[in-house]
Amino acid sequence: MKALSAKGFPGALGRNSVVSAILHKRELIVLLLLVVIVIYLQIASEGLFLRPQNLIIMADRKAPEAFVTIGITYLLITKQFDLSVASVMAFSGSATAWMMVNEFSISAAIMGGLFVGCLVGALNGFLVTKLGIASFIATLGTMYIARSGAQIITQGSPIGDLPESFIEMGKLKILGLPWYFLLLIVAIITMHILLKKMGGMNKLFYIGTNDRASSMVGIGTVKLTWIMFIVSGFIAAIAGIILTAKSYSASPIAFDKMEMRYIAACVIGGASISGGQGSIVGSLLGFLLIVLIGNGMTLMGISPYWENVIFGTILAIAAIADAYSVRKRGG
């Protein structure tokens, strides 16, 4: 049998390929859409949209959720889904809040919340890699388990009266910006470098393109896929804990039905549901596009029902582009 090289994985790392060009073009299109939307909102708001205060408010509200797209991107590249992320956010936040009101220290409570996220991620990885259950079905099941866990912990009601020092953590700013926004920037840069340049993380592209061939050339397909599920759960837990501090309470129904929005943001930004392509930067651009659409609709006083129409249209276009790129790879 001939040794397999990068050429044995069409579309995985071929930077001069048609698929790579399509991916980069999709990111550029999303970026141009963002520029157009920003210019329009700036004009429509008579110069108020780009005021530093408004930008800081948006960063404050949405930066914690943007973390989730990092883990989802890694999984999509490996041709996997994680439908449990939003429920893990609620579960981890609820677990952290429950521990604090039951006299655990803040640090212990945060560690407990992070453990919950990693535990659900590890369960997802086990179901997919060891039992061979499709990730869509496996994480759909853990989505309900995690959501039920949040409801059991909270008894169906929000947990409030959290320690003031924990709440202050959600308010902390560095250089006038929320600390978790700066952490998000560092995480995006770090994860992008790891994915593209270092640490063997680019093997995820091989796995997403052809997992069987990846195993044949010695890539730890099962191990890496399992780790990515744990990473996804860990990142979702971070987001859930930060948002719990920001909202002063933990709710079992928080982030309900948001998982599809996070996945869609990554697909809009260039990740493929068929695996083998995607980028952290592209997913962030897709997330920003969704955020700006919602912000713009509110600013213009348009019914939120129309937001789903616009969002669905953009997602459909992204899906068509994804299908086209998959056909190119197969060809």
Image (cartoon, helix red, strand yellow):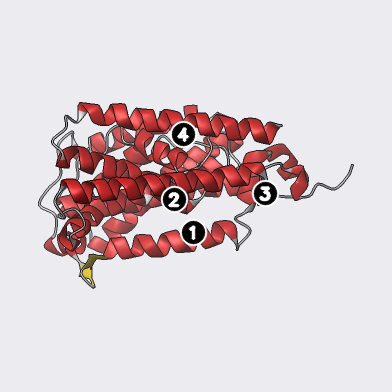
Q: Disc 3 marks which residue? A: 220
Whole-Å distance between the Cαs marked 3 and 4?
A: 31 Å
Q: Nearer the viewer, mark 3 or mark 1?
A: 1
Which mark is in front, 4 or 1? 4
Q: Nearer the viewer, mark 3 or mark 2?
A: 2
Q: Secondary structure at mark 1?
A: helix
In contact (CB < 8 Å): disc 3 and disc 4: no
Q: Quadrant of residue 50?
A: bottom left
Looking at the image, is mark 3 or mark 1 earlier in the sequence?
1
- Disc 2, SS: helix
**Mark nearer the N terminus (2 vs 1):** 2
Q: Position of residue 29 (x, y in %)?
A: 45, 44
3 or 2: tag closer to the N-terminus: 2
Mark 2 neighbour density, 10 Å: few (under 14) some (14–19) many (20 or more): many
**Mark 2 or mark 4, which is nearer to you?**
4
Near-viewer residue (273 or 113): 273
Q: Which residue is mark 1?
A: 191
Q: Amino acid at mark 3?
A: Gly
Q: Is residue 242 above or below residue 131?
A: below
In depth, the one of 83 and 313 nearer the eye is 313
Residue labelled with disc 2: 70
Q: Which mark is residue 77?
A: none
Is residue 97 in view? no
Residue 318: which disc?
4
Residue 331: horizontal and vertical position, in percent?
A: 71, 32
Residues under numbered marks 2 and 1 in contact, where contact means CB atoms less than 8 Å apart? yes
Crowding at dot 3, Cα within 10 Å, few <14 / some 14-19 / many 20+, comes out as some
Q: Residue furthest right?
A: 1
Residues under labels 3 and 2: Cα distance? 21 Å
* Amino acid identity at mark 2: Ile
